[in-house]
């Protein structure tokens, strides 16, 4: 299962890089005005509007692949088998006995040996 998750993660990273590259290659809306004055866009490989359609469709495919991989990784991360002895992390937390004095409840506080011995010798 871990190998499949790694493959999905690699596909997600590659699709993210493809989205970045395709968005940077595309022209903005203002590029059409420059193309009408002879900037050479009509003589391109895909024609005047063919490159815009090809790049936008490629970006949409890469984005769909990216979101699909994201959902797949979310599903894989939540489908791990549950712990056999406990249902949640809080159930597995260690149980700490309450402190005998207020000073012992402070993290990092040093409790005097006499106070701890008296607390352990107290009758129940």
Image (tube, rainbow, N blue to C red):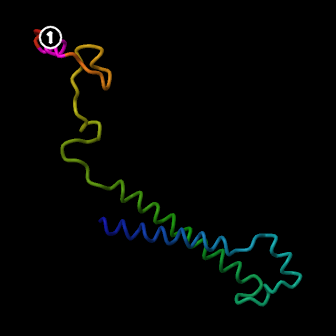
Front residue of 69/31: it is 31
Q: Residue furthest top?
A: 123
Q: Indicate the position of residue 2 as horizontal and vertical percent values.
A: 31, 65
Q: Is residue 46 left or right of residue 121?
A: right
Q: Is residue 23 left or right of residue 104?
A: right
Q: Which residues are magenta?
A: 113-120
Q: Indicate the position of residue 24 as horizontal and vertical percent values.
A: 66, 71
Label 1 belongs to which residue?
118
Front residue of 78/34: it is 34
In the image, is residue 51 above or below residue 62?
A: below
Q: Is residue 67 left or right of residue 117?
A: right
Front residue of 24/87: it is 24
In the image, is residue 90 above or below residue 105?
A: below
At 26% from the left and 42% from the top, the residue drawn is 87
Image label count: 1
Q: Is residue 57 left or right of residue 78?
A: right
In the image, is residue 73 above or below residue 98?
A: below
Q: Indicate the position of residue 75 as horizontal and vertical percent values.
A: 39, 58
């Amino acid at each position: 299962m871990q190998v499949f998750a790694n493959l999905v993660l690699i596909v997600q990273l590659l699709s993210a890089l493809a989205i970045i590259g395709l968005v940077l290659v595309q022209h903005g809306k203002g590029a059409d005005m420059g193309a009408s004055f002879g900037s050479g866009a009509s003589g391109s490989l895909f024609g005047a509007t063919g490159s815009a359609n090809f790049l936008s469709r490629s970006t949409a495919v890469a984005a769909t692949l990216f979101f699909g991989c994201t959902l797949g990784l979310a599903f894989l991360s939540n489908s791990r088998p549950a712990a056999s002895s406990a249902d949640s992390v809080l159930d597995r937390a260690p149980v700490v006995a309450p402190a005998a004095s207020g000073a012992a409840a402070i993290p990092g506080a040093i409790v005097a040996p006499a106070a701890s011995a008296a607390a352990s010798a107290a009758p129940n």
